[in-house]
Image (cartoon, rainbow, N blue to C red):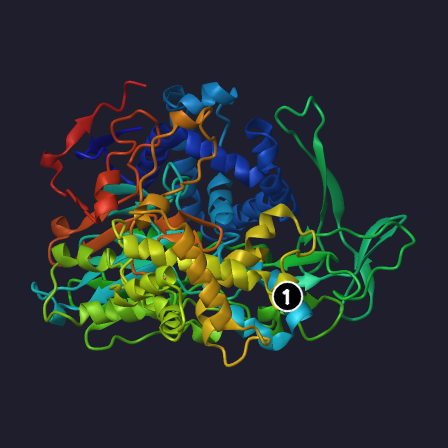
Amino acid sequence: MTFDLYRDAHGIPHLRAGDVLALARAQGRVTARDRAWQLEVERHRVRGTTAAFLGREALPWDRFARRARLEDTARRCHAALEERDPETAAWVRAYVEGVNEGLAAGARRAPEFARTGLAPGRWEPWTPFGVWLGTHILFAGFPAKLWREEVVRHLGPEAVGLFAADGPGTAGSNGWLVTGARTATGQAVIAGDPHRFIEEPGVYQQIRLACPEFDVLGLAVPGVPGIAHFAHTGTVAWAITNAMADYQDLYRERLRRTPDGVEALDPDGTWRPAPAHTESIEVAGAEGRPEEVEVIETARGPVVIGSPPPHGTTPAAGPEADPCAPLALRHPPRVTGDLGFGALLPLLRARRVADVDRAFDRWAEPVNVVLAADTEGGTLHRIAGRVPVRAAANRVRPVPAWEPGHEWTGWHETPYGDLDDGLAVMANQRGPAAPLGTEFAPPHRADRIRALLGGRPRWRAADMPEVHTDTHLASAAPLLDHLAALDGLAPAPAALRERLLRWDRRMAADSADAAAYAAVRGALVRRLAAEPAFAVLADPPAYPEVFQPWLALLPRVGLALEHLLTAPDLYGIDRPALVRAALEEAAATLGEGVTWGDTHRLAPWRALPPEAPGEAPQDPGLSGDHDCVLSTSSVPGLTDLASRASAARYVWDLARREDSRWVVPFGACGVPGDPHHRDQLPLWLTGGLAPVVTDWTLLTEEDVDHE
């Protein structure tokens, strides 16, 4: 294999090869060298084998991966692509060959392999499909339907809207397009930042891929070839956010065991066989005793929760009889055998907005909002992905599999959006995707971005960090209004209230007022959650652990606080009394001089935690909050630590690609101790962006034959 590898000052790989297949192979090889540990964790996640080297704490995911049949779905999608699109299948296979060539050298660099005793395994042609699936299977948040079921069961259907918000397990993003009519260059600028759980190494890989057919730079998903989500080809650029569409269903199943196996009751009243088998999960430190999991699939899909009752027992007929009755997951890739990989090569080859549009016609999973612009003035604002047509009830909560009327009957046409005054803004709010979803993010981020962009007549790419890093918290208004209405306060709470009413509502890391607001908010969330009307939701049914983030009461109350404070009536709860008590608690407990950044610190997920607390670098304090443009999400009432934030930031300049900018939370390399493992963190923290280097002569060539 012949290719050239160059790196810039931040170690970002720039790859050049003679053809598309050689380039894919090079991408796989370099990714394995830079991120071998990350790739191996992802490969094991697909197969449900992470507990074999990470221990019992990894079991919840492994059980889910087995029961959801992630590996089998990945195999199906790969086989279908080979038949439908052999060119793309060969391109994916070339990437896998490169990964296998680079893994051994990458593993020698990564200390995690020696620490766990893990040897790098072999990637299969279907493994990238599994990585994509594993990354996005919970992206649309189908477990939220379990939460809504509990809300309806305890509080009634009218209560569902109270908790409608960008949920604790949902990934979001900001993105905006400024046309040439609003820029200093006369060419469009696209900018934004995807919000995900922050992982180390990061979930996005900065990379450049060049061959005679194309020269594209952007943010790739390690383990998947090409650059799907955010890219600039030189003449066209695009970006995505989560459309917040609902395209995954949960079916409550009636299952029974017979001498011949498991059967499921279908809508026509017939009991039909549901294939079932048992798998073993090896667990590190379990003294040779594997964990067993039963894998069952009905005509709706794999059973991800619950199991059939013993032979001879009548299955429960509904959630009132058995809240933990078996639930099957139905989602498009399992139904169609298509993950949308057919879009990846056309995106790399895109020259104009029309090419990007046609490529996204092939998109499947996840469902996204797309913004694109080209150097000829073309723009694109659309939804891409596959959303089934079915009954409205399917979108809200689990539906009975044995009743007719809940079948999928086709696919929605994906809507297009407009630009308004030369701008398009996407921040998970209601918009073009509104007909396809149930819950959307509050409009605060989108409204704030549009207001900021309207604040100057002309924008340059270099100006965009002003938007990225804005910390104004519009969602603070309802709580501050409640504080303003209080009277008869003791001196300390009164002083704190006056301080908060003068506060500029910016969640800056160095702000003591922001810390005070967060303290009052957290105390109020805890008090609301303890109210009898809501406390019944504190102990949900014993669903598998992987679904618990969607069922936890404190995050739900914290993220829905605006609704809870502004609803006309809240089950007779005395909200002014709770606000008063929360203010008094904060006044009594808030430390002198404590700032928001003292407690609001980055808490990245690491597959392998440090052996001793002192081994991990000190994670920094952060500005921002969940509803700020600078979205750094904590769990009010539980912790100020932020596990979700900008997984990358980018600015694509259509006038001069070399004036584009980007940054990731840590660095380009996944190897601890490497100079480029965390060298972008200072930039990321301050809102800085690294330059995009396009001149090959300004890059440093690296020997690719030394391994």
Q: Nearer the viewer, residue 246 or 352?
A: 246
Residue under the point 54% across and 79% down:
569
Which residue is found at the position 49% from the left and 60% from the top?
525
Q: Position of residue 138 (x, y in %)?
A: 52, 53
User: Is residue 143 rendered to the left or right of residue 647?
Assistant: right
Indicate the position of residue 412 as horizontal and vertical percent values: 49, 72
Q: Is residue 358 visible?
A: no
Residue 33 position, x and y percent, is 35, 28
Single out the residue that lies furthest toward the left. Answer: 184
Would residue 617 be visible to someone looking at this image?
yes
- Within 10 angstroms of label 1, few (less than 14), some, or many (20 or more) residues? few
User: Circle 1 sits in a helix, a strand or a loop, which is it?
Assistant: helix
In this orientation, which residue lies closer to the viewer: 675 or 484? 484
Q: Is residue 531 above or below residue 621?
A: below
> Would residue 589 be found to the left or right of residue 684 on screen?
right
In the depicted view, which residue is nearer to us: 4 or 115?
115
Query: In the displayed image of the protein, which residue is found farthest to the bottom?
Result: 568
Q: Position of residue 291 (x, y in %)?
A: 70, 34
Is the residue 435 above or below the residue 612 in the image?
below
Name the residue beneath numbered marker 1. 532
Q: Amino acid at mark 1?
A: Pro
Is 612 placed above or below 413 here? above
Q: Nearer the viewer, residue 79 or 462?
A: 462
Taking the spot 11% from the left edge, 58% from the top edge, the residue there is 655
Rendered image quadrant of residue 109: top left
